[in-house]
Image (cartoon, helix red, strand yellow):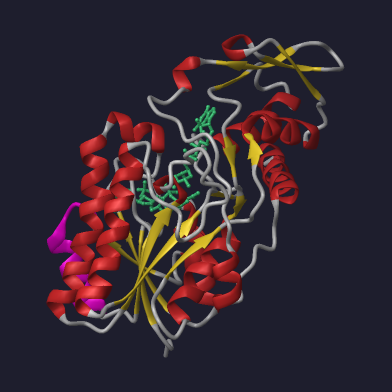
Amino acid sequence: MASKRALITGISGQDGSYLAELLLSKGYEVNGTIRRSSSFNTSRIDHLFDKIKRHYSDLTDSSSLNRLIEKIQPNEIYNLGAQSHVKISFDVPEYTAETDAVGTLRILDAIRETGIRTKFYQASTSEMFGGMPGTAPQNENTPFHPRSPYGAAKLYAHWITVNYRESYGLFACSGILFNHESPRRGENFVTRKITKSAARFVNNLQDKLLLGNLDAKRDWGYAPDYVEAMWLMLQANKPDDYVISTGETHTVREFCEKAFTEAGVKLGWKGKGIEEKGYDTKTNKIVVEVNPGYFRPAEVEYLLGDPSKAGKMLGWEPKIRFAELVKIMVAADIDELKK
Ligand code: NAP
Ligand code: F7E
């Protein structure tokens, strides 16, 4: 008999899959929501097929959420489901708000209405800070200034989580997580796009990598470390909000250099702005070009998190940092090609 029951929205995503593995290793009964799709969308959790319970649901559908919460009576709910792509949120702002903002309210209200005693984790994000000049390193007291429909929707979800904690005494935590990556990262996020391209480039499967803003700085951590922080938040004596990050920041350009170095190619750079190009210093072949199509209407230029509260209160710290993260991701993409 499992010790605790968990419900994870977005179990088929990067974090959902790692969190499911972590909770299974701790003896939980793991339930997760998946969406109906015309093509398979469960590749990250197929290896857990007979260990987890999967349920069709959607964050835009209150009745399915109410029914599931009532039926499962989870001890812990992790709300990881989201339209999580910042640039795409400018194209589908209303859907992003429905899923990421109102979807969170739907779960909180289902908990309140049913009166079920459950702990709640909200997947908040450093995008809520917006990386405004003079605010780094960002911590739990840094003012918010979202720069995208995604950031704005997540900020509503953050505050409604805090509000339901303060209004109704729910054990509800908001984890303000900075970017975290892994070999399971979606292929249209910049890190995975780069590591996959580096692997393909050295195998003569790809000629060029087209990127947007090379100067943006991110505090990139490792997803399996970050799902552990989610769990720790729900094991604390009292609910609270925490920044989770590595305390190290790098540009997209640096990520590129490191990834190509891992794949065996030393990159050099020439030109400025949209004319900037990355080239293979051995052959002079152009490898990276800037394509303004990847620019965003408003950019978050600089993120650097201060995770000291999580260190002090939860005993959490990142195990994997930038250099090792890039190494893990490039090695995984090279291995993938060998298969
Ligand atoms: P991800 O890989 O994009 O996974 C998102 C999950 O949400 C997927 O399972 C997706 O299902 C599901 N989903 C999308 N729309 C939904 C809807 N309408 N109803 C129900 N589920 C829906 O994201 P991630 O990187 O694992 O991130 C997990 C959570 O943390 C997200 O809320 C994200 O916004 C947040 N976050 C991520 C980071 C990061 O750096 N990774 C940092 C801070 C916060 P499909 O598989 O069917 O698409
Ligand atoms: O962009 C720049 C881009 O899409 C990172 C999500 O998980 O983390 C993620 O959001 C940076 C940006 O992640 C390309 O302009 C350059 O400055 O990998 P990304 P993100 O927008 O930081 C936060 C914490 C979340 O919560 C989100 O859910 O890289 N960039 N060239 C590019 N970005 C992409 N995607 N593609 C490019 O070609």
Measured as percent of width and height from the top left, residue 34 is found at: 32, 56
**Nearer to us in this view, 230 or 202:** 230
State whether the magenta stretch is mostly helix, strand or loop: helix
Question: Is residue 100 part of the magenta span, yes or no?
Answer: no
**Nearer to us in this view, 230 or 48:** 230
Q: Relative to residue 81, is residue 249 drawn left or right?
A: right
Q: Relative to residue 303, is residue 284 drawn left or right?
A: right
**Res 11 → quadrant:** bottom left
Q: Residue at x 55, y 44 (%)?
A: 303
Q: Is residue 159 above or below residue 214?
A: below
Q: Is residue 169 above or below residue 80?
A: below
Measured as percent of width and height from the top left, residue 53 is found at: 36, 70
Q: Residue at x 53, y 23 (%)?
A: 212
**Nearer to us in this view, 85 or 26:** 85
Q: Relative to residue 101, is residue 322 drawn left or right?
A: right
Q: Residue at x 74, y 30 (%)?
A: 257
Residue 213 visible in the displayed image: yes
Q: Is residue 304 above or below residue 104?
A: above
**Res 49 → quadrant:** bottom left
Q: Residue furthest front?
A: 134
Question: Is residue 70 part of the magenta span, yes or no?
Answer: yes
Report how many numbered discs are placed on residues in the image.
Answer: 0
Residues drawn in magenta: 58-72
Measured as percent of width and height from the top left, residue 70 is found at: 19, 77
Measured as percent of width and height from the top left, residue 95 is found at: 23, 40
Residue 45 visible in the displayed image: no
Report the quarter where the N terminus lies: bottom left
Report the quarter where the C terminus lies: top right
